[in-house]
Amino acid sequence: MSGPLRVGLVGAGFISGQYSQTLARSPGLRVSAVSDLQTARAEALAAQHEGARVLPLPDLLAAPDVDVVLVLSLPDSHAELASAAIAAGKHVYVEKPLALSVAEGRKVVEAATAADLRVGCAPDTVLGTGVQTARAVVDAGRIGTPHSATAFMTTPGHERWHPDPEFYYRPGGGPLLDMGPYYLTALVHLLGPVERVVGASTRPLPTRTIGSGPRAGTPFPVEVDTTVTGILEHASGAVSTLVMSFDVWAARLPAIEVHGTGGSLSVPDPNLFTGQVELHPAAATEWVDVGVVAGFRDAGRGCGLADLAAALGEGRAHRAGAEVALHVLDVMQSVQTAADTRASVALTTTCRRPEPVFGVVDLV
């Protein structure tokens, strides 16, 4: 297609502001329509994009000037909205997770394949200079053969800062489904797909209390486990340890570390696009800053959609694709199943490592 990819944005909530900034500065994208249950929110976001208008969801899906639907709604509606967009003949890009179950996610992917449409899915933070620089180090063999990794995300919980945090503690939320996609997608980029997992989880608090906004002080129930630990066996032979928790007040744990036969690598927070990558070769006595050698420069949320637009024009696979998103969903679901059943679980999906971002390039 010629010209920018025209975006219909569904869901003008908290995360939409970050996407909006990226969409506004991406020459390959143009927001043409916005839909949200709260009209005022939709109007405020549409005002940030020249020519964008507010539409009810059915009208947005039917609009001839919408090529791709960007789904930024709550997780329990992702699969339904993605399926509706595909049925309307639109490409779709979904905020993570792709769906609440592998079965739902697989239906989305199969429908898109049958319709010859693209499905993209966050997180695209892995396309920034942090994780992509780390991947370049691994791919160059600078730590030898990778054999193990650790990934830690610990926080007291999102209710401290989010004014409407209940969805984080309902099915579809929790630290594993909320934050796991960042860490697991990074591990897939670094070490490849996972074959088998074991897991354990706990839920120490039955209720939480909203800590900010007009509803501060309001208690609400916790419906999901809030600390989840998994051991992942990668197809490459590497083993990763994953800890996701909304129950930790303070910790000194690294975000991600990868260890190989020839050295160790410190990877920055995969919830961010940038960060310091440090290498400790086997023969060294201290960590060394690698510098920035790969990834999208000055990237923000939505760069995966920009890459999808470029990939359509270039006839290549986009990097933040459905194959990885479905596999990451499978890993998360399998870790929770392993925790619930106290048994190891073999994954039903796999994926290819996406093409890396070669060198440091400007946002497409």
Image: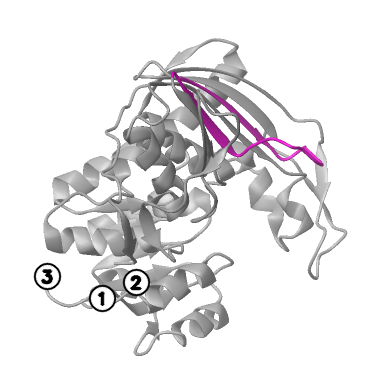
Q: Position of residue 61 (x, y in %)?
A: 30, 68
Q: CA distance from mark 3 to mark 1?
A: 17 Å
Q: Residue at x 54, y 41 (%)?
A: 288
Q: Residue at x 38, y 34 (%)?
A: 138
Mark yes or no: residue 264 visible.
yes
Q: Position of residue 48 (x, y in %)?
A: 46, 85
Magenta stretch: includes residue 267: no
Question: In terms of secondary structure, where does tag 3 sit?
Answer: loop
Q: Does label 1 or label 2 sit earlier along the sequence?
A: 2
Q: CA distance from mark 2 to mark 3?
A: 17 Å
Q: CA distance from mark 1 to mark 2?
A: 9 Å
Does residue 149 sit above or below 96 in this rendering? above
Q: Position of residue 348 (x, y in %)?
A: 34, 22
**What amino acid does circle 1 point to?**
Ala
Residue designated by label 1: 63
- Left or right relative to 209: residue 189: left
Q: Which residues are magenta?
A: 239-261
Residue designated by label 3: 1
Does residue 292 sit above or below 170 in this rendering? below
**What amino acid does circle 3 point to?**
Met
- Left or right relative to 305: residue 3: left
Q: Position of residue 117 (x, y in %)?
A: 19, 54
Residue designated by label 2: 8
Does residue 225 sit above or below 291 in this rendering? above
Near mark 2 (Cα within 10 A), the count class, few <14, some 14-19 or many ≥20, is many
Question: In terms of secondary structure, where does tag 2 sit?
Answer: strand
Of residues 278 and 208, the one nearer the viewer is: 278
Q: Residue at x 42, y 35 (%)?
A: 328
**What amino acid does circle 2 point to?**
Gly
Magenta stretch: includes residue 244: yes
